[in-house]
Amino acid sequence: MTQKAIFYHAGCPVCVAAENRITEIIDRGRVDLEIVHLGDMPGRIDEAEAVGVKSVPALVIDGAALHINHGADLSALR
Amino acid sequence: MTQKAIFYHAGCPVCVAAENRITEIIDRGRVDLEIVHLGDMPGRIDEAEAVGVKSVPALVIDGAALHINHGADLSALR
């Protein structure tokens, strides 16, 4: 069974570094990873906030938000 | 080629939640994951600090520290 994970970022250096690390360790056979650039897709900021994302980069797995280091607060992206 | 990753934690609820998420998405075929409880192994706090870990839980991959949410500052574990 694959599970869904969403990596939210905003293209910042901290985001890119975290994205590179996460994408290299994740098991793509079991995890369906979607990468969402909130700067390009501001319409998805509400969705991220609804599952508890407060800053980017963040990885959401099974509806749980993991904030990975700190690039920018979500509020700064609106 | 497998790569080495170390997950540092201190047994806190935030740590355990993050550990569960990370261990379920990581590709164990490519990543050699070591879990280090710094409360049980305070002798390894210096090693964590040396690679840039400032708080737990944190995942270190290729010498880069990813702080995942925030359980406790490293200084609180000494």
Image (spheres, coloured by chain):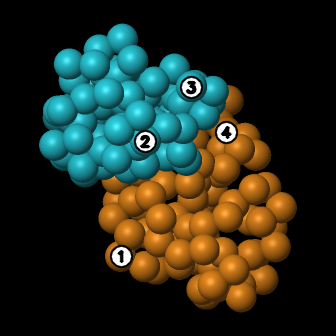
Chain colours: A cyan, B orange
Q: Nearer the viewer, mark 1 or mark 4?
A: 1
User: Image point 24% across, 49% down: which residue?
Assistant: A52
Q: Quadrant of the N terminus of chain B?
A: top right
Q: Residues within 10 Å of mark 1 (few under 14, many from 20)?
A: few
Q: Which residue is mark 4?
A: B3
Q: Nearer the viewer, mark 3 or mark 1?
A: 3
Q: Which residue is mark 2?
A: A73
User: From mark 3 to mark 1, how far is it between C-alphas?
Assistant: 29 Å
User: Image point 20% across, 19% down: which residue?
Assistant: A43
First reached walking from the N terminus: tag 1 or tag 4: 4
Residue B31, given in percent of the width and then of the height, sits at: 57, 41
Q: Which circle marks residue A12 in the picture?
A: 3
Q: Residues within 10 Å of mark 4 (few under 14, many from 20)?
A: some
Q: Residues within 10 Å of mark 2 (few under 14, many from 20)?
A: some
User: Image point 35% across, 76% down: which residue?
Assistant: B13
Q: Nearer the viewer, mark 3 or mark 2?
A: 2
The kind of secondary structure element at disc 1 is helix
Residue B69, given in percent of the width and then of the height, sits at: 44, 58
Residues beneath discs 3 and 2 located on the same chain:
yes
**Along the horizontal axis of the image, is B76 left or right of A64?**
right
User: Image point 43% across, 28% down: which residue?
Assistant: A9
- Which amino acid type is marked by label 2? Asp
Q: Which residue is mark 1?
A: B13
Q: Quadrant of residue A45?
A: top left
Q: Chain of mark 4?
A: B
User: From mark 3 to mark 2, how far is it between C-alphas?
Assistant: 11 Å
The kind of secondary structure element at disc 4 is strand
